[in-house]
Image (cartoon, rainbow, N blue to C red):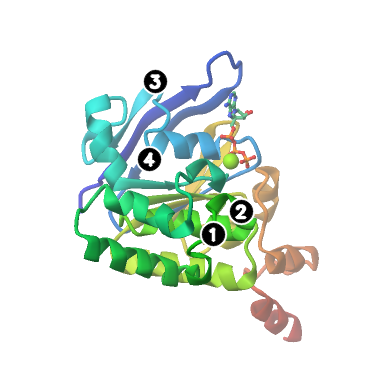
Amino acid sequence: MAPFFILDQVSYCYPGSLTTGVCQVNLVLEPGTFLGVLGANGSGKSTLARLCCGLLKPTTGQVLVDGYSTANEEELRYIYRQVGMVFQQPDNQFVAATVEREIAFGVENRTLSSEVIRQTVGLGLSYFGLETLRNADPHSLSGGEKRLLSLADVWVLKPKLILVDEPLAMLDPGAKQRITRFWQDLRDQGQSMIWFTHGLAEVLSADLVLVMENGRAVWTGPPGELLAMPEQARAWGITLPPATEAADRLGVKEPVVTNEDELVSVLWK
Ligand SMILES: Nc1ncnc2c1ncn2[C@@H]1O[C@H](COP(=O)(O)OP(=O)(O)OP(=O)(O)O)[C@@H](O)[C@H]1O
Ligand SMILES: [Mg+2]
């Protein structure tokens, strides 16, 4: 399938800032791809995410979605329908007085059918376990609940590409499981996702990982390859899965360990 999402030599400088937010990043995504973007604090992940969804316009280079450019105001409307963004700070996203109204907001912009709106909102509430909070004020939710609501907001709109910025921050194991199921379902439906984080464990099943350092894309490859180079990954400010970290400290170089079960079986040999 033809790539539908292209970053062509994309750079961005924040006005008045001396440091470059993002510097000459190239990327080509085919439909149904799961890309992990990894990097330390301040490496440019959130800036890149905002460029990918059209919220920031590249200072140089271009971001193309189905051939439409985010630099062109008339084409942005189309791009906003194809690319959904889940922000690192969920509060930035909320516009309505209740959880239910919040999920309905985007759907109402797409359809006039009250039955479709009701069904879609119901689906979003149950999929993310938010039914009991349907009448709550989004701003009064806990950090993890806000995160789930911001995912529901975007999920119900079924964009071709979902961008999630540090999605597991503040989530308990149950909520994390929901998110894991969420992206597996996305994949099954041929939707694409870019997941921005500093934790390699979160993107182990990604098709590809891109590492950011000081605004630049410094490495691209499958996540398994990054696991096998723990020292370099640490130097880039990437958090390794705890079991990989433990195996490395114990001097276990092979096989590469990704979880506790693998670590136990290696140590018992
Ligand atoms: N609004 C802004 N104005 C000026 N500089 C900014 C702004 N937002 C970010 N930056 C700078 O751009 C660089 C990249 O920041 P960004 O937020 O993209 O990093 P990040 O990888 O998402 O970090 P974190 O892991 O902490 O979320 C940093 O040097 C940061 O200080
Ligand atoms: Mg960030």
Q: Residue at x 35, y 55 (%)?
A: 104
Do callouts 1 and 2 mark residues in contact (Cβ within 8 Å)? yes
Q: CA distance from mark 2 to mark 3?
A: 40 Å
Q: Residue at x 70, y 69 (%)?
A: 243
SS at mark 4 in the image: strand
Give the class, few, some or many, for how many residues have Cα within 10 Å of label 4's Cα (few <14, many ≥20): some
Residue for badge 3: 60
Q: Quadrant of ligand 1?
A: top right
Residue for badge 2: 140
Q: Amino acid at mark 3?
A: Thr
SS at mark 3 in the image: strand
Q: Which badge, 4 or 1, is on the more N-terminal residue? A: 4
Q: Nearer the viewer, mark 4 or mark 3?
A: 3
Residue for badge 1: 136
SS at mark 2 in the image: helix
Residue for badge 4: 27
